[in-house]
Image (cartoon, rainbow, N blue to C red):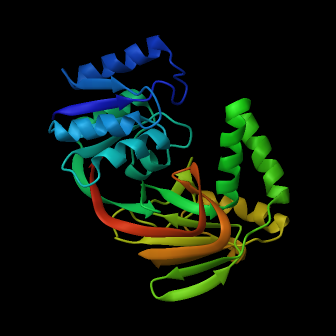
Amino acid sequence: MNIRFILNPHSGKLKGDADKIASMASAIQLNFPGADMRLTKAPGHATELAQEAARAGFDAAVAIGGDGTINETARGLAGTDTALGVIPNGSGNGFARELGMPLLFEEAVARLQRAQKMKCDAGRANGELFLNLAGVGIEADIAWQFMEQGKTGRRGMWPYFKIGAKTAFTYKPHTLDVDFDGRRETVAPLTLVFANGRQYGSNFKIAPGASLTDGELDMVAVQDAPKWKLALAAPAFFTDNWRPFGITQTTRVKHALIRQPGEIVYHVDGEPRKTRDTLEIAVEPGALNVLLPSR
């Protein structure tokens, strides 16, 4: 199989470590002699490298990194015959977990040797592709604050935790008008998520019934319940089906239009975005080929 590997050298614990990157390259060459490997240099570069791979007729482009790198690579492959492969090297690794990819690098590379292609759906948020999740609400607000802080201050888990903890006690849900598949509802959820895959990452399953291949998105509204109820319900999100207290309401949709006067903060596979007045969500069935690892 003719494969290009696209590595984000700053993802996960790499932080530009030349020795670790060289070790990864050696493992790739051991399993795929002569494979092409490229390092990303800036945001959006993975998309360019994936587009080049598709034009050159590669069988697959394998993204090595977190959900952001995987998303960028997928954008360059959607609508082409070149398949998306995934080797997780981020923090949550939501999409990689959905595909059943091992989290150990060497094992993940080996499992790709006998991978099979499958058609995978994607979502679109205002036309921008997402593989796993997009949504509005508290997690989009936290992601935006974290991005803004990263421009002038520290990043990492501890700053993210502090922003999240503060926001959890101060966040006020917005009232949203949502048109979906011929219906209209007015809601004020803690978060409104459109799920192609089941989880954010780290096995936190916001939409346990979602599927990457069913041609639909799971629209999950999380109620703005009392803090004690949310705290007691939190462990349930690491299970496949149990959802106590009626915290979530799930509807399967193909298209949705969210209306809110003024600024709308949302996220696309965890990356924060802003728009005004309306946010359009749609599913694109069979948008790209994906390498499913051997069992």
Count of residue discs: 0
Residue drawn at the location 71% of the way across and 73% of the way down? 223
Where residue 108 appears, x then y in whole percent? Answer: 36, 34
In the figure, residue 114 lies in which quadrant? top left
Q: Nearer the viewer, residue 169 or 245?
A: 169
Q: Nearer the viewer, residue 12 or 171?
A: 171
Residue drawn at the location 65% of the way across and 73% of the way down? 260
Where residue 288 appears, x then y in whole percent? Answer: 28, 55
Q: Residue furthest bottom?
A: 183
Q: Nearer the viewer, residue 124 or 225?
A: 124
Q: Look at the image and tell me in which quarter the N terminus lies.
A: top left
Tell me: 84 left or right of 274: left
Location of residue 47 with respect to 33 vertically, above or below:
below
Q: Nearer the viewer, residue 211 or 121?
A: 121
Let me know if residue 201 appears in the view. yes
Location of residue 240 with respect to 157 vertically, above or below:
below
Location of residue 128 with respect to 111 vertically, above or below:
below
Residue drawn at the location 47% of the way across and 35% of the way down? 43
Let me know if residue 155 appears in the view. no
Q: Residue furthest top?
A: 19
Tell me: 177 left or right of 180: right
